[in-house]
Amino acid sequence: MNRQTQAAVLLLIGVALLHGALTDLYLRYVKEGLRPLLLAAGTLLVVTALATAWYEWRRARREERGTGTGTGTGTGDGDGDGDGTGDGDGTRGHAHRESRVSWLLVLPLFALVLVAPPALGSYSATHTGTALQQPYGYAELPAGDPVPIGLVDYAGRAFYGHGRSLEGRSVRLTGFVAVTPSGTPYLVRMALNCCAADAQPVKIGLTGNIPPVLQPNAWLEVTGRYTARRTRDPVNDGPIPFLRVTAARPVPTPRDPYDETWNN
């Protein structure tokens, strides 16, 4: 791969990173807090690519000027070696043809830009054990009912906090539906430490006024109250608290499908 090809590939990678970071596409791969790093990395790659292309253009111009002033030396066509280069220095005739296979490196970039992968859904949730962890503490819930709360936050308060901070409060949370083989409906949010590769589900069992038809992967906004009911995940024996549903309605997939309260 010559320098021009390297510059082109670097430029395409940088543009792809900037495209993902300036839109919501990056949220399918990493958590929202990493956006500044993606912007910095994309900008650095674009600047490096442009600098490499400029340097190669300057070098080519210098070589052209040098070749034009030294064509009368006759050193390249009278050496009797029969190579027939005749270019004045005997070296330029040995340039190798660049392989076109290197351009295949850009195909994943076009896939990144043109084909946005779906967020992890019910299949991953039902085949992976819940990743609920005991939080360090609980922030005071704001006034008003129902109070919007993250699914991971509710699960931690319900199981490890035994619902003490939820008593007498109506909560509203959002997640996608997963249904176990036994028919138990879960509301799930995939939680990230860093990126989608380490995403793990946190699950809440639903009881009470559940919609009669639940479509896996459908997003619901659920309003309900704490219940002491709980169970264990059959995949890893992790804790799964329940929510007593009073109302539920379908909602579009949120801008960020992964739960941002994982590290809180």
Image: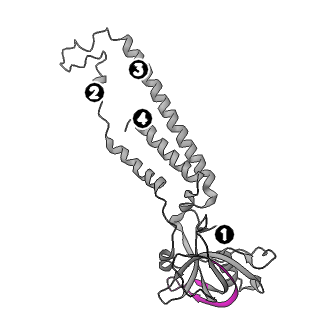
Specify few, some or many for label 3: CA neighbours under 10 Å numbering under 14, 14-19, or 20 or more.
few
The label shown at residue 4 is: 4
Q: What is the magenta segment's predominant secondary structure?
A: strand
Q: Alpha-carbon distance for marks 1 and 3?
A: 58 Å
Which residue, given by chain and number where applicable, does mark 3 sit on? Answer: 63
Residue for badge 2 = 94
Marks 2 and 4, Cα distance to the nearest angstrom? Answer: 18 Å
Please tell me whether residue 214 is drawn above or below residue 45 in the rendered image. Answer: below
**What x and y, as percent, mark residue 183?**
51, 89
Residue 243 pos. (x, y %): 65, 85
Q: Nearer the viewer, mark 2 or mark 4?
A: 4
Q: Looking at the picture, which amino acid does disc 2 mark?
A: His
Among numbered discs 4 and 3, the one appearing first in the sequence: 4
Occupied quadrant, residue 100? top left
Q: CA distance from mark 3 to mark 2?
A: 16 Å
Q: CA distance from mark 4 to mark 3?
A: 16 Å
- Image position, residue 106 (x, y; %): 41, 47
Q: Which mark is residue 261?
A: 1
Which of the pair 156/255 is nearer the observer? 255
Q: Quadrant of the C terminus?
A: bottom right
> Is residue 216 covered in magenta?
no
Residue interval drawn in magenta: 221-240
Estimate how packed mark 1 is, as few (under 14), some (14 to 19) or many (20 or more) residues with alpha carbons within 10 Å. few
Q: Amino acid at mark 1?
A: Thr
